[in-house]
Amino acid sequence: MGPSLMITKVPMTPLRVMGMVACVAALCLIFSALSAPERQTKLGASLEQPVQQFKRDTSGKTMAAPSFWRTFDFLSDKIPKEVESLASSVIVNKSTINIMGANTFYREAGPPEGVSWSGEAVVLLHGAAFQSKNWLELNTINTLAAMGHRVIAIDLPGYGLSGSAQAGDPADYLNAVMTSFKVTKPILVSPSMSGSFSIPYIIKYPQSLGGYVPVAPVSSQLILATASSVTVPTLIIYGEKDVGLGHKSRDDLSKIPTSQVVELPNAKHPAYLDQPVMFHTLLYNFIKQVHAYRAVA
């Protein structure tokens, strides 16, 4: 008789069973990781967290209350690191468009490749000594676009590279800007001189903005008669050292129920120049909350 094949059976102890299960699980995880499709960066998704949190907790009631906008901490979240790294890859286009007879120069940017659009548009105005170029130099256009937003910075009539032709009523001009660029309920950033456009615009077209960020604007006294009826979320910014127009606009605009005042420390009249990181952080958090508010409104 030939030699028999002897198979030694290994006893299946509980420890060995657990080891086999762990090995199978590890192999499944490796296979899943190798077969998963590559996903795009979606910085716009950072806006969805407050939307989901808000829907779950308050069902749209708290944000509609003035107390929310007066008390929310708009410095609560830091700008994600990937925004800083992607800002340099943002493409900023520039061109000219005729708006109400005014040859208007503008710069425009959208999210860079791999970043989804948030659905929000930000329109940047400027002060008398400035122009859209300053938002480029401050990296504001690139930073906002890297967050996933569409950004439009214009040179107001008679300033920067825009023509000197008068555009008629300033409120109608801004309304024509929004129509020309096909933006609905944008966030409007309005420093200093540009208040002569943005304040009349809010008075005449009170439902047209998603959010308003005045930075020590002129003409703030014009809103006093109607301030109590304004419902647009408003983030009032001014510099600590701007004791003139900064304080005046702060006192006037704070009459808006859905507003909050933020003072930038050690900053002068163009406060964003002295505190650009803080300024951009405020915009980041403010736009996130405006986005969440619009999603549940």
Image (cartoon, helix red, strand yellow):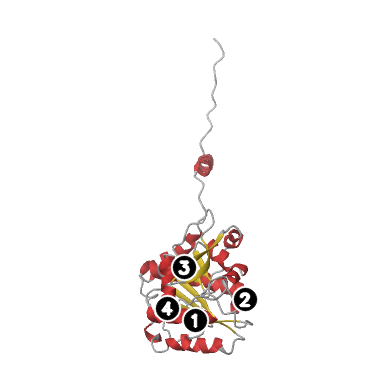
Disc 2 vs disc 3: Cβ atoms closer than 8 Å? no
Q: Which residue is drawn at 50% across and 41% down?
A: 35
First in sequence, mark 2 or 3: give its number. 3
Question: Which is closer to the viewer, label 4 or label 2?
Answer: 4
The residue under label 2 is: 273
**Residue lying at the far top of the rendered structure:** 1
Question: Which is closer to the viewer, label 2 or label 3?
Answer: 3
User: 12 above or below 154?
Assistant: above
The residue under label 3 is: 98
User: 165 above or below 112?
Assistant: below
First in sequence, mark 3 or 1: give its number. 3
For residue 37, say whether it is visible: yes
Q: Residues within 10 Å of mark 1 (few under 14, many from 20)?
A: many
State how far apart marks 1 and 4 are (Cα). Answer: 10 Å
Disc 1 vs disc 4: Cβ atoms closer than 8 Å? no
Kind of residue indicated by mark 1: Gly
Disc 3 vs disc 1: Cβ atoms closer than 8 Å? no
Dot 4: element: helix
Kind of residue indicated by mark 3: Asn
**Nearest to the observer: residue 188 or residue 13:** 188
Q: How crowded is mark 4: few (under 14 residues within 10 Å), some or many (20 or more)?
A: many
Q: Residue at x 40, y 82 (%)?
A: 203
The residue under label 4 is: 171
The residue under label 1 is: 195
State how far apart marks 2 and 3 are (Cα). Answer: 30 Å
Residue 272 place in picture, x, y as percent? 59, 76
Question: Which is closer to the viewer, label 4 or label 3?
Answer: 3
Question: Which is closer to the viewer, label 3 or label 1?
Answer: 3
State which quarter of the image contains the C terminus: bottom left
**Nearest to the observer: residue 11 or residue 177:** 177
Dot 2: element: helix
